[in-house]
Image (cartoon, rainbow, N blue to C red):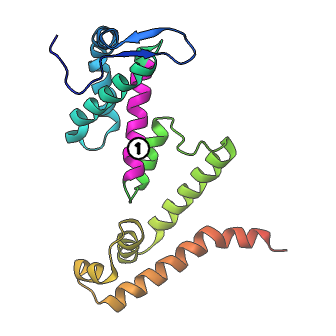
Amino acid sequence: MAETTGIDRGDVTLPGAGKVVIAPDVEAWFVREVLPLEAILMQFLRRHCRNRIDVADLCQDVYVRVYEKAHDQIPDRPKSFVLTTARNLLIDRVRKNQVISIQTVADLEALNVAIDEPGPDRVVMARDTLRRLQIALNRLPERCREALVLKKIEGISASDIATRMGISENTVNYHLTHGMLALADSLYGELADSGRDP
């Protein structure tokens, strides 16, 4: 096996186990247990990563994290550990993005991932709110919806939206105001109405 540079080859004590793991033992474990899982790992990453170009880099990042963690303690179930590490890496990448699309949220739900680990009641309420928001967005006039999505979801300035849509900045502001009022009325109006006396 080729010599790997930059890796401490000393003994590593496992916390609480009283055993000593020697760096070459970690390498042997990695080659024997982790590398054969590459096909499963790549399939998992391709299924859950939106940008196919990043899959190879993600795979390498997973390997680095798994290898580094194995110096602390070699996991009992390598397959589960590798896939959990991959899932956590995907979550970290989503968190680093400033704009999280509704589709990304749906992708995370498919992974059975709870970023803040909300309770089941919060999950149900959040899904219902997201569903109602999508319905409310779909009810908006097309140009109004486009301006609102560009501003509130993609974070584009009103002047850039005006240029992109071929309208004045005042018209963009009108669409934004109208859209926000319509969304608020759609989302909260029915709640306010349900709290009123008949």
The image position of residue 156, as x and y in percent, is 32, 73
The image position of residue 179, as x and y in percent, is 47, 77
Question: Is residue 86 found inside the magenta-colored segment of the image?
Answer: yes
The image position of residue 124, as x and y in percent, is 63, 47
Is residue 164 rendered to the left or right of residue 79? left
Q: Which residue sits furthest front?
A: 10
Image quarter of the C terminus: bottom right
Q: How many marks?
A: 1
Which is more toward the observer, 140 or 81?
Answer: 81
Is residue 57 rendered to the left or right of residue 195? left
Which is more toward the observer, 71 or 120?
Answer: 71
Q: Which residue corresponds to the image point at 35% horizontal and 71% vertical from the top-left?
A: 150
Q: Is residue 93 above or below residue 36?
A: below
Residue at the spot of label 1:
92
Image quarter of the N terminus: top left
The image position of residue 138, as x and y in percent, is 45, 65
State whether the magenta stretch is mostly helix, strand or loop.
Answer: helix
Q: Which residues are magenta?
A: 80-96
Q: Which residue sits furthest right?
A: 197
Q: Which residue sits furthest left?
A: 2
User: Toward which corner of the image does residue 145 lie, by quadrant?
Assistant: bottom left
Which is more toward the observer, 10 or 73?
Answer: 10
Q: Is residue 65 above or below residue 143?
A: above
Q: Which residue corresponds to the image point at 38% horizontal and 59% vertical from the top-left?
A: 98
Q: Is residue 115 above or below residue 148?
A: above
Label 1: few (<14), some (14–19) or many (≥20) C-alpha neighbours in 10 Å: few
Question: Is residue 73 found inside the magenta-colored segment of the image?
Answer: no
| SS at circle 1 | helix
Q: Which residue corresponds to the image point at 45% horizontal and 72% vertical from the top-left?
A: 140
